[in-house]
Amino acid sequence: MTTDFAATRALFQIPEGVVYLDGNSLGPLPRGVAERLASTVTDEWGAMLITGWNRAGWMEAPARIGDRIGRLIGAEPGHVVLGDTLSIKVYQALAAALQLRPDRRVIVSDSGNFPSDLYMAEGLCRTLGADYTLRVVAPEDVPDAIDDRTAALMLTEVDYRTGRRHDMPRLTARAHEAGALAVWDLAHSAGALPVDVAAGGADFAVGCTYKYLNSGPGGPAFIYVAPRHAQDAHPALSGWLGHEAPFAFEQHYRAAPGVARMRVGTPPVLQLAALDAALDVWEGVDMNDLRARSLDLQQRFIAGVARACPQLQLASPRDPALRGSQVSFRHPQGYAIIQALIARGVIGDFRAPDILRFGIAPLYIGEAEIDAAIAALADVMATDAWTHPDHQRRAAVT
Ligand SMILES: *Cc1c(COP(=O)(O)O)cnc(C)c1O
């Protein structure tokens, strides 16, 4: 192993005494981000005013930083761009995929997909007309659900609840065999495990940056369009910054070359600056090392919880090859148990109806954090601490 995980741990600012197992939902703050944001605000916005668009490279940032993410997901250079939220990027990728298969009307997805992805697909079907349908099947039934009516297979590689991982190359090949396109959501993959969209044959891929890529709350999403589609993918959201010549202010839309057409409007310059600084933590990280370390830590956690808390049922696959970088358990009182854990400084989260979720991000989580989390969980279960009324009250964000 060549990656120095003690060194990456030192790059994060995590409050003293906190064990942070929720980087799959919102990554923690990399130390370089605050300084970079301050300098972007003061030295760029403050000092340059509107000239920052040219002088500070604000306009190119979505493509330049997109390429930094491209390196983490195996994308060809120049085929990833940043902007908007993931829900928007899902819509754009799916709409473009449907347009590339105009004689087909069915989107296939699975019940493990994140609701927003399914909601966006439903909305797109409604907009396109009654004959478009979204077919949602159980994750294991996906291969058989793809047929010659399928326009697009839309899947999230790693299930946000259970951490179950789909076989991206195999399912993509299955979609292609049937003449369909594959749209992959990498929300729980980018920065979590090795991903190779080019080798895996993905037609489109999308993901967010505020989870394992630590860009901060509201950080922009990314979209990848395979080079073979780059000139044909029609942007459903034809905003001015996806125009070939935005500053010609022409009356009619002409798509920019390549993935740049997936830009919509003004880029979030401050969030992009935060992301750019956050991506520095990946310098010197080998994704295969990250994966090996994540699986070791997951195994330690699963074994420890099985020993100390037999009441919790493992919700993630037992086979490590089938897991992403999180471990989940089921318990009917999952919400209150997570609240009691948070009160002990161990931050995980809860997903309805009964999932306790723990993200294992080796950049800042090691054996000590895993052992502390097991001990805290054992204490919560042994003392029934979760029965306290404070822990039963639901907050808006779980
Ligand atoms: C986190 C997540 C989202 C969130 O979408 P936003 O538009 O960024 O709020 C969407 N899809 C998946 C699969 C996710 O994991």
Image: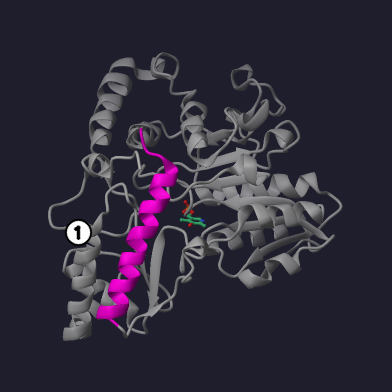
Q: Residue at x 43, y 78 (%)?
A: 353
Name the foreground residue: 40 vs 329.
329
For the C terminus, the quadrant is bottom left
Picture mark count: 1
Does 344 appear above or below 74?
Answer: below
Does 77 appear above or below 312?
Answer: above
Name the foreground residue: 172 vs 28.
172
Q: Residue furthest right?
A: 103
Q: Residue furthest left?
A: 16
Picture quadrant of residue 373: bottom left
Name the foreground residue: 172 vs 387.
172
The residue labelled by disc 1 is 368
Name the foreground residue: 203 vs 198.
198
The main secondary structure of the magenta stretch is: helix
For the N terminus, the quadrant is top left
Q: Residues within 10 Å of mark 1 (few under 14, many from 20)?
A: few
Residue 107 location (% of width, % of height):
72, 60
Residue 124 location (% of width, % of height):
68, 55
Q: Is residue 397 visible?
A: no
Q: Which span is picked out in magenta?
A: 284-309
Tell me, yes or no, whether the highlighted magenta stretch contains residue 290: yes
Residue 173 location (% of width, % of height):
72, 52
Residue 2 location (% of width, % of height):
34, 38
Tell me which amino acid carries mark 1: Ala
